[in-house]
Amino acid sequence: MPLAGHGLRPAALRRRASRPQLKRDPLGSHTVPSPTTNVSPHSMAKYPMTEPIAQRQYMFQEADRLTPIVVRIGKPAPFPDGPQDWYCPYTIEGPDVLREHYAGGVDPLQALLLTLSGLRAHLLHLARRGKLTWLDSEDLGLAFVGPAA
C-alpha cells in the first residue's frame, strides 16, 4: 500500500524529539569561565563543548572599535542524560564575552542544522549593535537556500 496521499508516514518520520529543539535556558546558565574572556550571563551551556569541527572569525565594529568575533561549532554528541536525542554545542567569543550555547535534535544532522540556525540568529542580533563582517562583507555566510530557508 503506498504511503503518499493517505496521511500515513513511516514511524521513523513521525517520531518527535523528546526535548525542545532550540535550547533556551530562562533561569540562567551553567558556564565555565574562559581565562581570557568574561562569560556572558546570557550563555546557556549545560552540556560540555565537544571536539570543534568548524571555526570562523568575523569582525565586529562598534563606534571606532574593531573586535574579532570567533565562533566554534562542536561535534554533535548524544545528550549525556538522555538515551536518544543529540546536541551540538557552539560558542561565540567576543566582544569581551564568551557565549556558550547548544541546539538539540533527534539525530546529529538535525542538531547541527539547528545549531547553524541558532548561531545565525545570535550573530544577526549582535550585528544590530554595530557592523559585523566576514571576508569584508556583511553577508555572514550562514544563510540556508531553498524553501526551507
Image (cartoon, rainbow, N blue to C red):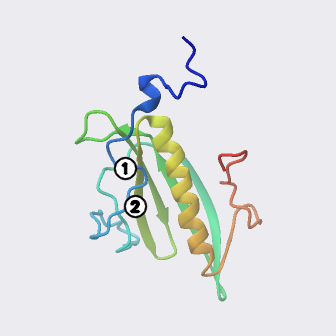
Vertical arrangement, residue 61 with respect to residue 43, above or below? below
The mark that comes first in sequence, 1 or 2, is 1
Instruction: Say which of 136 and 139 sits in front.
Output: 139
Q: What distance separates the C-alpha of mark 1 from that of mark 2?
A: 8 Å
Instruction: Please report the residue visible at 47 percent of the width from the left and 29 percent of the height from the top.
Output: 13
Vertical arrangement, residue 17 with respect to residue 35, above or below? above
Residue under pointer 1: 49
Residue under pointer 2: 100
Q: Secondary structure at mark 1?
A: loop
Instruction: Say which of 54 and 101 sits in front.
Output: 101
Locate the N terminus by quadrant: top right
Vertical arrangement, residue 52 with respect to residue 57, above or below? above
Instruction: Please report the residue visible at 30 percent of the width from the left and 63 percent of the height from the top.
Output: 31
- Relative to 149, 78 lies left or right: left
Q: Are marks 1 and 2 in contact (CB under 8 Å)?
A: yes
Indicate the position of residue 79 as horizontal and vertical percent values: 30, 41
| Disc 2 residue type (three-letter) | Glu
- Relative to 138, 81 lies left or right: left
| Disc 1 residue type (three-letter) | Met
- Relative to 66, 1 lies left or right: left
* Label 1: how many Cα within 10 Å (few below 14, some 14–19, many 20+): many
* Label 2: how many Cα within 10 Å (few below 14, some 14–19, many 20+): many
Instruction: Please report the residue visible at 37 percent of the width from the left and 67 percent of the height from the top.
Output: 43
Q: Secondary structure at mark 2?
A: strand
Vertical arrangement, residue 30 with respect to residue 6, above or below? below
Indicate the position of residue 9 as horizontal and vertical percent values: 49, 25
Pick out the residue farthest to the front.
Answer: 6
Indicate the position of residue 126 as horizontal and vertical percent values: 57, 73
Instruction: Please report the residue visible at 29 percent of the width from the left and 66 percent of the height from the top.
Output: 29
Pick out the residue farthest to the left.
Answer: 81
Pick out the residue farthest to the bottom.
Answer: 63
Pick out the residue farthest to the top.
Answer: 1
